[in-house]
Image (spheres, rainbow, N blue to C red):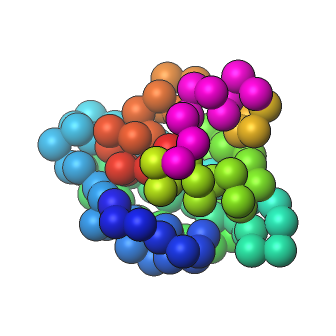
Amino acid sequence: MPQVNSVDEVFTHIEEGFHPDKAEGMDAVFQFVLSGDTGGNYWVKVANQQVEAHEGMHEAPTMTLRSSSEDFLALVNGQLNPMTAFMQGKIKVQGDMGLALKLQTVLGIA
């Protein structure tokens, strides 16, 4: 995914970073809860090697990632290492941790 300037831009252009070949067999909903003035709630569904993104809360996400919008943008733009951010508590993951590890390869984010 190219450099982004806003959280909304990440989810508006999610298809650009999506790698359908790496999503084979995946059926998951990723919920993003991003705090701060430029944050928001978004969810991304990956199924049948396709991706779709929506604003708001999903009723039954497979995995939830919580972060500040600033740290999330730094992750997406490659300015913050995902593992370091997790260890420092800058991102928190609930649900299927294995899916969190696939975010970068499947969606091109984090």
x then y, percent, for residue 48: 26, 50
Q: Residue at x 39, y 73 (%)?
A: 13
Q: Nearer the viewer, residue 13 or 81?
A: 81
x then y, percent, for residue 19: 23, 49
Q: Is residue 39 above or below residue 103?
A: below
Q: Is residue 52 above or below residue 85?
A: below
**For residue 97: magenta?**
no
Q: Residue at x 54, y 74 (%)?
A: 5
Q: Main secondary structure of the magenta part?
A: helix
The residues colored magenta run 79-88
Q: Residue at x 21, y 49 (%)?
A: 20
Of the 4 image quadrants, the one containing the N terminus is bottom left
> Is any part of residue 62 visible from this angle?
no
> Is any part of residue 41 visible from this angle?
yes
Q: Quadrant of residue 50?
A: bottom left
Q: Is residue 106 above or below residue 44?
A: above
x then y, percent, for residue 11: 49, 69
Q: Residue at x 46, y 48 (%)?
A: 78
Q: Nearer the viewer, residue 36 or 3?
A: 3
In the picture, measured across the screen, residue 57 lies left or right of residue 80, that is right
